[in-house]
Amino acid sequence: MRLGYVLRRLAFLLGVIWTAATLNFLLPRLAPRDPVMQKVAQLAATQGLRGEGFAEYVQSQKELYGLDRPLWAQYVSYMWGILHFDLGFSITNYPTTVNQLIAQSVWWTIGLVGTATAFAFAIGTVLGALLGWNKSPRAMNALIPPLMVFSATPSFVLALVLIYFLAFRAKLFPLSRPYSLFVIVDWSDVKFLLDVVHHAILPALSLILVSLGQWSLGMRAMMVTVEGDDYMTFAEAKGLKGSRLFLQYALRNALLPQITGLAVAIGSLVAGSTLVEVYFNYPGLGNRLGAAIASFDYYLISGIVFFLITGIALATFFVDMLYPFLDPRISYARGT
Amino acid sequence: MRGFFRYVGRNPALGWGLGILALLLLFSYGGRILIDPADAYALATKPDLPPMLDREALAKIGEMTTFEDKLAQLRLGLRHIFGTDTQGKSLLASMVLGTGLTLQIGAIAGAIGIGIGTVLGFVSGYYAGTVFDNIVTSLVDVVLTMPGFLVLVLIASSLADPNQMTVLTMGLVVSVTAWAFPTRAIRSQVLSMRERPFVMMAKLSAMSGHEIILKELMPNLLPYLVMSLANSVYGGVMGSLGLQGLGIGDRRQPYLGMIIWWIQYYSAFLRGMWWWILEPVTVIVLLLTALILISFGLDEIANPRTRRTV
Amino acid sequence: MSEPILQIVDLRVYYHVEAGAVKAVDGVDLDLDPGVKLGLVGESGSGKSTMALALMRMIKEPGKIEGGQMILDGTDLMTLTTEQMRQARLSQLSMIPQGAMNSLHPLLRIEDQIIDGMRDHDPTLTQHELRERVGVLLEAVELNPRVRRMYPHELSGGMKQRAAMAIAISMHPQLIIADEPTSALDVVIQRQVMETLDRLQEELDLSIILIGHDMGLMAQFVDRLAVMYAGRLMELGNTRALFQEPLHPYTDLLIQSLPVLENKGVFTGIPGITPSLLDVPPGCVFNTRCPEATDVCREIVPAFRELQPGRWAACHLHGVVEA
């Protein structure tokens, strides 16, 4: 039954979210490190130590963040908060909530990851298909080694190379930041938008090239497999035009299995964007996460990681729901 | 032996991959002779030097009498051949040691990943449908859905002091996500092999479950296991590079990813220190490309269907 | 006597591998008259499927049509450009594949797969005309009109084979090559499909080449039969005459190996195996397994010649003539 499949995938999605939430809750708390002490120590270092009242201050901070209660009580209120989409306060940025901090940064990340996925997928699919097509010019195979290198390189390492050559040496692109200093942030101004795009190109490129390498090589392998299938022989015997053979028969059949890898690809793009944002000083979630790690802000780290994992799990779920529409052979009844 | 080389000749991916890896191993373990390990740490020598040879020091080799002294002079002479960074570390020393460290982490993660992956994969695949199998499969699915890197970040930042992580610790952390993919891959291979006639024969001859796994299934899947190992190592190295890139780990050690972190910290690209950037990047790209090529080449052995037969 | 619809003259197809040249088809001469059903029978590796691909000019690397002519209705297919050959496929000659199980596009509806072939050959056809034609074709192959909106995986083996037949006749070609169309089907479905094919042949006056290894099936269906072995033709003739009085020892052995109900439990075969096509034995290619081989058979390649009106064979037993 269709419903069975949907329910099963939904249950799986909830399972992932629950696991992520629990993991996010437990891990920081299992650490011997204490975020309150860390913050207090930091404050003491920057603003001077006051001998008396110290213990009371620490205690009040702990109460504020609920860290003085037993573990199970914290877990319950944590899960309760999750159900209400409440990820708590950021310890280092009190009184800003985690949600607010995420909201400030998330759109930059979505923009970056979104465009990178779209470009990499579109170009990678076509490129990979052409590379795998037996009637393509042999010269195209020269692209394979560079694509392989791209797919093997971590995106932040590639980012470094791009920054050095294109931003520093050639001065074609800015070195960092989402938009230039001293500009007025006006989203309705075309010049501002162009500035944003100009700043986004290198970060996006670092992500796109890596993903492109992986996509195109995967697509190429699939094309080679598809070309050996019987329906390609019969299609040729039908005297179909070359373009139809390539697009509707080969590419379309090769693309389908690739789509199951889309969610995984998005996951790795998000992971890559974390580092790329730090290196480009791009104000997305990744950058926020990097700062949170440095100051060991429990809630912020947990919140961001949980948010990202949930986002990717949702994307996976979405792709799972989409797949039966694309492949008539998969009925909702059969599931995976 | 000759057969090996002839095969490699027909499998260029594997050949190149192994070749590059061999070169890197030579660089990292053989190169130790040419460095003084202390030079890989801060304040070892003059900072911000572009690549150069210390000709004075090299000239003095002739003046030395003992082999140790000559060697020490050679090391002094070569110390700046890759330049130095802002903290005064010799980049030659950093990279020689760093490559070794990264390979060690990869090996640990790879070994654990393939170890757990093999055990879980074989057992759950062979006994598919049982409660054990269902638990394992669900666990694997959940772990694989979560972006591994983020989990690693979470774990790493929860440790007592991330800045004191040893190679072993980092290897262990990275292997937390390295076991999932091999488990799933091996399990699916086992599932398809289970129905083959030779397994049926083994069952009929009253071989016990684990005997069949060890004596029949494993030898047949050996190429596949080696390929999974290569993938595990690759995943481990990637994971560790990512963590180091964020500055998680012992920052004083010359991990390859940590060198990158320092580059970013000191804005090396703003100061035109091209050698500092290009050298570790080259080594990283070579290492990862080698691992991918090996994996690619092994895939050909493991999956003969894709072999380019005549 | 009308002109033959197909004339194959000295066709050679070699596969060039590291070890040398595999001579899959080595000098085949064949004529086919219009409206005639010709069977091409042989063991695995005899070259019969290669013949099919060669006629469609779909031989892929490292294979190559080394020489010969394939004259379809006056035009030598070897002289056509790639585009002309593409046009000729489906409209002049078409193919019914062996395993229609996997020969249909898995993601397209049946009617779309029938239409795209027609569209790529005659762009002037309107959508309406195309859809009408699909209806006519499905009826001709005895498929329920509902099938048009279905996907291949929803059809049975026999239905898929009929769909493939519908595609093959969609542009009303002159020649249909059926490459073991029923090998993957059970006997009952086999019969139904062959009957449909027979009927289509009559209604549309098609010329058919049926390729297979089932002598029994051939006996029931084809008018003329060609026997192939190791890349060469051994015998060619009217089916009935061939079965009653085979001119070539190989044909005789093939007929004898058909199980007979009276001799239940007795199975005969042909001892030995087909020779490697890389290293063909000298003389008559069958001499290594022929029970009546003589010395001359091991030295001189027999010519494939007309021994009786309409009956050809390549055998020294009817007189030694060199090829």
Image: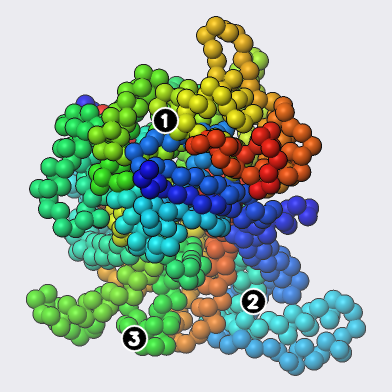
Looking at the rendered structure, which numbered label has been put on residue B92? Answer: 2
Q: Chain of mark 3?
A: A
Q: Nearer the viewer, residue C173 or B34?
A: C173
- Say which of marks 2 and 3 sits in front: 3
Residue type, label 3: Leu
- How many other residues sit within 10 Å of disc 1, few (<14), some (14-19) or many (≥20)? many
Specify whether disc 1 shares its chain with disc 2.
no
Whether residue B32 is situated above or below residue B164 in the rendered picture: below
Q: Is residue B165 visible?
A: no
Q: Chain of mark 1?
A: C
Question: Which residue in the protein does label 1 denote?
Answer: C222
Question: Badge 2: few (under 14), some or many (20 or more) residues near its Cα, within 10 Å?
Answer: many
Q: Residue at x 45, y 49 (%)?
A: C7
> Same chain, marks 1 and 3?
no
Foreground residue among C149 and A84: C149
Q: How far from the left and from the top, in percent, is residue B64?
A: 87, 85
- Residue B130 appears in the figure: yes
Q: Identify the residue shown where x is 69% and y is 88%.
A: B53
Rendered location of residue C167, percent (x, y): 28, 42
Task: Answer with the quarter of the image where residue B70 lies.
Answer: bottom right
Q: Position of residue A328 (x, y in %)?
A: 25, 38
Q: Is residue B229 placed above or below B84 in the rendered structure? A: above
Visual colour scheme: rainbow
Q: Which residue is mark 3?
A: A172
Using residue B70 as the reference point, say whether residue A99 is left or right of it.
Answer: left
> How far apart are labels 1 and 2 at the CA level?
80 Å
